[in-house]
C-alpha cells in the first residue's frame, strides 16, 4: 500500500470513528436521534431507560402504498424494533399503518388489505 492510500484510509477510518462517537454523544445527551421529518420517510433511534428494560428503540416510517378510504391524503407505515441489553420479558417488535388528511388530520388505520 502506498503512503497516500494509507493516509487516505487512516483519514477515512478517523472520520467514521468520529461520526460514530458524535452519534453516541448526541444520543446520550438528547435521548434520541431523528433523521428525516418529511411525510414520506423518517428514521428515529431512542434510548429505552426504564428500570426493567434498557436498550435502544429504532423506528422507521415510510409512505405506504395504500390510500385513505373516501378522502384525499396519504398513509404511513411505521415499524418499531427494540434492541435491549436488559429486559424483564418478551418485548415484541411492531408495525402499524395510519392514514392522514392532506392538511394533517388523522383519518385512521390503513385499509387492511394494503398494509
Image (cartoon, rainbow, N blue to C red):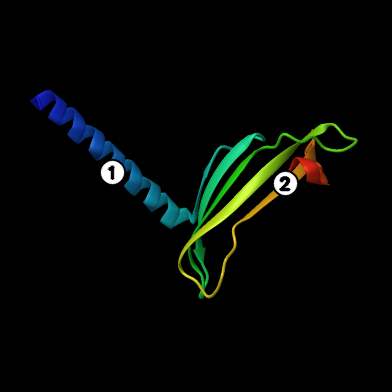
Which residue occupies the foreground of this view, 23 or 76?
76
Q: Secondary structure at mark 2?
A: strand
Q: Is residue 51 above or below residue 104?
A: below
Left or right of 16, for residue 41: right
| Residue 22 image point, x, y percent | 36, 46
Judging by the rendered image, the residue that carries numbered circle 2 is: 97
| Residue 62 image point, x, y percent | 63, 38
At 70% from the left edge and 37% from the top edge, which residue is drawn? 64
Tell me where residue 89 sits by quadrant.
bottom right
Tell me where residue 74 sits by quadrant.
top right
Badge 1 crowding class, 10 Å Cα cut-off, few under 14, some 14 to 19, many 20 or more, is few
| Residue 90 image point, x, y percent | 56, 70
Q: Earlier in the sequence, mark 1 or mark 2?
A: 1
At 72% from the left edge and 34% from the top edge, which residue is drawn? 65
At 51% from the left edge and 55% from the top edge, which residue is drawn? 46
* Nearest to viewer (mark 1 / mark 2): 2
Does residue 110 appear anywhere in the picture?
no
Badge 2 crowding class, 10 Å Cα cut-off, few under 14, some 14 to 19, many 20 or more, is many
Q: Is residue 46 above or below residue 64?
A: below
Judging by the rendered image, the residue that carries numbered circle 1 is: 17
Label disc, if present, on residue 108 of the rendered structure:
none
Left or right of 110, for residue 52: left
At 54% from the left edge and 47% from the top edge, which residue is drawn? 44
Quadrant placement of the C terminus: top right
Amino acid at each position: 500500500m502506498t503512503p497516500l492510500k494509507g493516509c487516505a484510509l487512516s483519514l477515512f477510518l478517523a472520520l467514521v470513528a468520529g461520526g460514530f462517537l458524535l452519534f453516541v454523544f448526541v444520543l446520550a445527551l438528547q435521548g434520541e436521534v431523528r433523521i428525516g421529518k418529511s411525510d414520506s420517510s423518517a428514521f428515529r433511534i431512542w434510548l429505552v431507560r426504564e428500570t426493567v428494560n434498557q436498550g435502544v428503540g429504532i423506528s422507521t416510517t415510510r409512505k405506504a402504498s395504500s390510500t385513505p378510504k373516501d378522502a384525499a391524503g396519504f398513509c404511513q407505515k411505521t415499524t418499531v424494533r427494540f434492541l435491549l441489553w436488559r429486559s424483564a420479558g418478551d418485548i415484541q417488535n411492531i408495525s402499524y399503518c395510519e392514514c392522514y388528511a392532506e392538511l394533517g388530520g388523522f383519518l385512521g388505520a390503513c385499509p387492511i388489505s394494503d398494509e
